[in-house]
Amino acid sequence: MTKNTVTQENVIEVCHLRKNFGKNEVLKDINFHVKKGEVVCIIGASGSGKSTLLRCINLLETATDGEIFYHGENILKKKMSGAAYRAKLGMVFQQFNLFNNLSVLDNCMVGQTSVLGRKKEDAESIALSYLELVGMKGYIDALPRQLSGGQKQRVAIARALSMEPEALLFDEPTSALDPEMVGEVLKVMKTLARSGLTMLVVTHEMAFARDVSDRVVFMDQGVIVEEDKPENIFFNPKEKRTQEFLRRMLDE
């Protein structure tokens, strides 16, 4: 079951993207887009290039060739500030990437004050609202080392949301969590998806991709093998590689 896309406007468009690490070509002529209000999930085996694609889109890796458009503007040509661009496209990482010496509240305020130039009281108010959304308002004075993995990831989501980005990129946000903590993070992500937030999610959570996404992209060996609505990918995949991957994943 998918929700309606808010508009047909592309927020992100990737054209003929390639990425090499030395002689190893990790991304090979990648083309796809994410429309405003869409939830797009990227699935595939480890090493298929999913996380590298996300890191290229967010300028954490430099593409070898190709174009990345944000609202029709080629960000690779514009040479815009990485920090300013990443304020528009937030990212949630596998390993949380919280500042260990800062409290939960300060983790959610520091980007707002240093990158966006918000006043401290405004940043605090915004941070508290998003910490409440993810169920972490009661932990504002805690340090990351005092939190469980699921709690850290929920703080990381609140921190990304506090920048009030147009879209959020999720790089396997549950892969570093104990199984019993996965549900609490997925619950938050489902709430965000229902709110109409534009989301690009690299995930191994097949049920989330099937039930929440508007579109699913299957990658293998650095290429997009198949891209379609979740009901078609999961119940009637066209490509043999997609069929084999899903058979392995769903039999586990």
Image (cartoon, grey):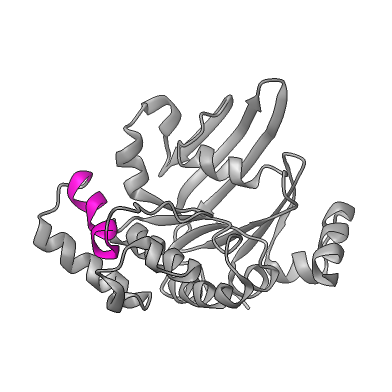
Camera-side residue: 94 or 45?
94
Q: Give the image quarter of residue 143.
A: bottom left
Quarter of the picture containing the C terminus is: bottom right
Q: Residue at x 38, y 74 (%)?
A: 134
Q: Per the image, is 24 magenta?
A: no
Above or below — where is 62 with respect to 10? above
In the image, residue 120 lies at what x, y percent? 11, 57
Q: Residue at x 37, y 62 (%)?
A: 144
Q: Residue at x 62, y 32 (%)?
A: 16
Camera-side residue: 128 or 99?
99
Q: Give the image quarter of residue 20.
A: top right
Above or below — where is 100 with respect to 206? above
In the image, residue 86 lies at what x, y percent? 37, 44
Q: Residue at x 45, y 64 (%)?
A: 153
Majority secondary structure of magenta residues: helix
Tell me: 86 left or right of 22. left
In the image, residue 223 lies at what x, y percent? 73, 41
Viewer can see residue 7: no
Q: Which residues are magenta?
A: 103-115
Camera-side residue: 41 or 141?
141
In the image, residue 126 lies at what x, y percent? 21, 66
Quarter of the picture containing the N terminus is: bottom right
Tell me: 147 left or right of 17. left
Q: Give the image quarter of residue 83.
A: top left
- Toward the front, the furthest residue is 146
Viewer can see residue 24: yes
- Toward the top, the furthest residue is 23
